[in-house]
Image (spheres, rainbow, N blue to C red):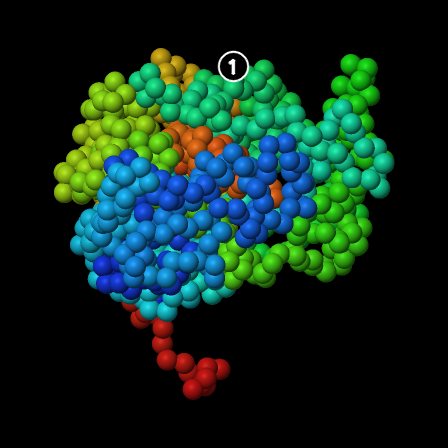
């Protein structure tokens, strides 16, 4: 079953395909949960042993009921693959950790929890040790309310988390779910029953698409709820997962040997390990493109203290065009943010958009030219990928990435007289970078025992190596389910209720559906819910903000709750001005990040506008960026297939703040592209591929001044695929309050320590949301030199323009019976 916001290339291979409204994945998951909970199709044993759903939560303060409140006993000692660290206890390096490590201060703060035994009609305590086969929950109450006597004599009303969530999910009956998501009610019911039919046998392979919305954490929580209700977390045959390259960092928990080597105590003996000591403080990489400021509502700071950004003084990155050249709100970043920075340094193996804006560009080796070995891994395959040195000569005067760093280190050593700047890179000068790789291998749980010299030699001959993970293929949650190891949470269970104040204030203590923050036809970012005693969102007025203020900055922290009946009568605030199309920018399946510009033949794969001869000199390259739009939507705007169109997003801050008084920069930042008729996308939904290189001042200058019309910078090798603007003309940076809490409990990036608050790539703002609502207007006819129809449309080869021959071809009339006399088979 493929669920997507278009009839995609994956959908054609599915048994069933469900096309949904973009950004409504949380509502769809809740609709499926509604059927499963209402019809009691859930895996009761899994719910009882591995989730927090049976635990009691207080009605009065919305907090989990603690055992100490009821029984007076202090938290139980933890023994199940867990070690509680007293203050001052030394934490082993990540690769040497086996048990879960929890500071005693956190352990005491969390306490133990309470469930209601239906058989005895009494409350019972449960610790985070008691999961899986150790669970004491024999016959827990899942639905209803109970009165619990506290140790102090008070009696309070409590409800199981299951019951609290079920009440919320009742709002997402199949009919309502269909109205919200466009998924047919019958499909919602049949799919829910199919998933629940055989627990633990459904794989939820979640693509990157739903991650691109502001409500992506709501998506994760609701989908995990669906998976847990049906026993599909941690099983070999049934599990849930998504992909992001960032996750691979945890595969090498020995990386601190390299990135955290103590610069004041450098180990120069390659046979010995480094002595890591971290002096640097990480921050989310997604504040600088939000103009380096945190989120406030009125005078209240929403961004947590552990997340607080500092002013960005410099950017230095390697082979990561998305950090600058393809960052969300790119044009605001380059116009309004970069002037405040002191240095931008880029290491690249082609001239990307980032290079256009850099002060310093280091030309580095591509994988085919590596003179220093390297390695990596992926969360989606089992291999330890080794990149061996190549005998190929460098065609240009490039250097290895690590060599650039070493050269800068040597220059700093010379300028400062401090030898340590050079010593940090000693093994680069020695042509022995294997030392750094071996240290990582020796201290990583998944690679201990490997020798980099042997791995490199095998890689030269195409012999693969496997990461030594517990299961192969990887099955996240396997140890929790099969070894009864606690999850990395307060309760030791999969948690679907959030008792932290930040989540209660946001109205997200339950796994809820929020409308997208911009890509919606309705009032943005509202919580869809019937009146619920556990949803007590802190509304705008509580922050001293007008409830009707829907400006973008306010919208991020705006907690307004509406039923679907109320919500469907609302409209996006810009709808009245013609901004009525959802604009989403997924990655193209034939490209990796921003590769298509590098060779003209790869660019030609990106849709129907490839023309190696560039007969139309308006075309910026051998191919160009375009927007997919439903033919009926285009017709309603008098836009023909192949026409050039302007695409504009919220004029208050896009393509950048202050564009109204900055015509010079607006000239290269406003999005101009082709329109492609695409019946596979629903009406009201448009799509543009993420991968293509955007316009810069230099590319626009080249397009207007060069005789051949190429959008190529006269002073650099930069080649754009747009005449002006790019897909990032419509995006901006967004900060979600529940990404920036100081209280959320999470596992550390490396090893098995459990902590709380900010952690890069784990609990922090992300650069994923690329939402926009846009207005589309015709700019120029698509025909050669802006005259008439684009040729494929004029020839009757395109949707809505089909001539008789094309219609016959599409109906299968060109297929005839085989003729054995002419070589055909009977």
Image-quadrant location for residue 544: top left
Q: What residue is drawn where x is 24% and y is 34%? A: 536
**Residue 657 in view:** yes
Quadrant (top left, top right, bottom left, bottom right) of the C terminus: bottom left
- List the residue tagged with mark 1: 340
Residue 4, image x and y in percent? 35, 52
Q: Nearer the viewer, residue 622 or 673?
A: 673
Residue 265, image x and y in percent? 78, 27
Q: What residue is drawn where x is 79% and y is 29%? A: 266
Q: What residue is drawn where x is 60% and y is 18%? A: 343
Q: What residue is drawn where x is 60% and y is 32%? A: 87
Asked whether, in this view, residue 779 is left or right of residue 10, the answer is left
Asked whether, in this view, residue 285 is left or right of residue 54, the answer is right
Residue 30, image x and y in percent? 28, 51
Instruction: Please determine whether, in this image, residue 229 is positioned above or below residue 752.
Output: below
Secondary-structure class at tag 1: helix
Q: Nearer the viewer, residue 533 or 106?
A: 106
Q: Nearer the viewer, residue 658 or 312?
A: 312
Q: Nearer the viewer, residue 384 or 167?
A: 167
**Residue 182 in view:** no
- Count of labels in the image: 1
Question: Would you call the spot at circle 1 few (<14 residues within 10 Å), some (14-19), or many (20 or more)?
Answer: few
Quadrant (top left, top right, bottom left, bottom right) of the N terminus: bottom left
Instruction: Please determine whether, in this image, residue 152 is positioned above or below residue 412.
Output: below
């Amino acid at each position: 079953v493929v669920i997507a916001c278009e009839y995609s290339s994956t959908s054609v291979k599915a048994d069933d395909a469900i096309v949904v409204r973009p950004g409504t994945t949380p509502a769809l998951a809740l609709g499926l949960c509604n059927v499963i909970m209402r019809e009691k199709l859930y895996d009761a044993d899994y719910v009882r042993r591995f989730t927090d759903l049976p635990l009691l939560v207080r009605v009065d303060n919305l907090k989990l009921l603690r055992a100490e409140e009821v029984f007076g006993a202090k938290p139980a000692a933890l023994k199940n693959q867990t070690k509680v660290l007293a203050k001052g206890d030394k934490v082993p390096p990540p690769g040497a950790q086996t048990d879960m490590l929890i500071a005693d201060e956190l352990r005491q703060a969390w306490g133990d929890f309470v469930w209601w035994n239906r058989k005895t009609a009494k409350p019972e305590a449960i610790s985070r040790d008691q999961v899986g086969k150790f669970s004491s929950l024999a016959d827990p109450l899942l639905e209803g309310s109970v009165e619990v006597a506290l140790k102090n004599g008070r009696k309070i009303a409590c409800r199981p988390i299951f019951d609290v969530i079920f009440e919320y999910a009742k709002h997402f009956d199949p009919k309502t779910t269909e109205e919200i998501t466009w998924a047919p009610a019958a499909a919602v019911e049949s799919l829910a029953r199919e998933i629940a039919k055989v627990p633990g046998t459904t794989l939820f392979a979640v693509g990157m698409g739903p991650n691109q919305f502001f409500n992506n954490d709501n998506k994760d929580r609701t989908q995990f709820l669906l998976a847990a209700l049906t026993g599909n977390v941690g099983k070999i045959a049934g599990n849930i997962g998504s992909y992001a390259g960032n996750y691979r960092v945890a595969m090498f928990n020995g990386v601190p040997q390299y990135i955290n080597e103590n610069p004041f105590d450098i180990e120069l003996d390659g046979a010995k390990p480094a002595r890591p000591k971290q002096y640097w403080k990480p921050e989310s990489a997604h504040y600088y493109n939000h103009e380096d400021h945190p989120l406030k509502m009125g005078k209240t700071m929403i961004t947590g203290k552990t997340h607080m950004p500092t002013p960005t003084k410099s950017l230095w990155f390697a082979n990561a065009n998305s950090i600058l050249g393809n960052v969300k709100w790119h044009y605001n970043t380059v116009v309004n943010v970069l002037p405040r920075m002191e240095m931008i340094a880029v290491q690249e193996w082609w001239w990307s958009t980032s290079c256009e804006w850099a002060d310093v560009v280091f030309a580095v080796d591509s994988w085919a030219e590596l003179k220093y070995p390297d390695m990596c891994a992926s969360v989606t395959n089992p291999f330890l990928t080794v990149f061996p040195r190549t005998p190929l000569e460098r065609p240009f005067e490039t250097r290895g990435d690590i060599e650039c760093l070493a050269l800068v280190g040597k220059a700093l050593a010379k300028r400062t007289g401090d030898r340590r700047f050079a010593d940090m890179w000693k093994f680069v000068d020695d042509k022995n970078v294997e030392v750094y790789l071996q240290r990582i291998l020796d201290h990583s749980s998944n690679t201990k025992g490997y020798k980099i010299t042997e791995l490199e030699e095998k890689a030269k001959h195409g012999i693969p190596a496997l990461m030594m993970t517990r299961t192969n293929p990887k099955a996240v949650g396997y140890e929790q389910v099969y070894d009864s190891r606690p999850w990395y949470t307060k309760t030791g269970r999969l948690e679907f209720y959030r008792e932290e104040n930040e989540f209660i204030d946001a109205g997200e203590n339950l796994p809820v559906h929020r409308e997208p923050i911009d890509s919606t036809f309705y009032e943005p970012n509202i919580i869809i819910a019937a009146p619920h005693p556990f949803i007590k969102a802190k509304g705008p007025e509580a922050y001293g903000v007008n409830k009707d203020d829907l400006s973008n900055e306010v919208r991020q922290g705006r907690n307004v709750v509406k039923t679907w009946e109320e919500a469907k009568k609302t409209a996006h605030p810009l709808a009245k001005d013609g901004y009525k199309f959802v604009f989403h920018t997924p990655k193209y399946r034939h490209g990796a990040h921003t590769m298509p510009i590098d060779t003209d033949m790869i660019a030609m794969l990106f849709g129907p506008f490839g023309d190696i001869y560039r007969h139309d000199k308006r075309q910026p390259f051998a191919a160009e960026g375009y927007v997919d739009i439903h033919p009926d939507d285009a017709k309603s705007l008098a836009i023909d297939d192949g026409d050039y169109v302007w695409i504009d997003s919220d004029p208050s801050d896009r393509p950048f703040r202050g564009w109204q008084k900055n015509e010079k920069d607006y000239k290269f930042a406003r999005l101009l592209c082709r329109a492609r008729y695409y019946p596979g996308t629903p009406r009201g939904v448009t799509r543009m591929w993420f991968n293509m290189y955007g316009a810069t001042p230099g590319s626009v200058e080249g397009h207007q001044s060069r005789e051949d019309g190429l959008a190529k910078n006269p002073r650099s090798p930069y080649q754009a695929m747009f005449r002006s603007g790019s897909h990032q003309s419509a995006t901006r940076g967004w900060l979600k309050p529940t990404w920036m809490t100081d209280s959320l409990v999470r596992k550390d990036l490396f090893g098995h320590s459990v902590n709380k608050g900010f952690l890069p790539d784990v609990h922090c703002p992300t650069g994923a949301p690329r939402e926009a609502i846009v207005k589309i207007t015709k700019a120029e006819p698509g025909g050669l030199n802006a005259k008439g129809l684009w040729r494929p449309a004029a020839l009757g080869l395109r949707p809505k323009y089909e001539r008789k021959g094309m219609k016959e071809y599409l109906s299968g009339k060109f297929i005839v019976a085989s003729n054995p006399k002419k070589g055909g088979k009977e």
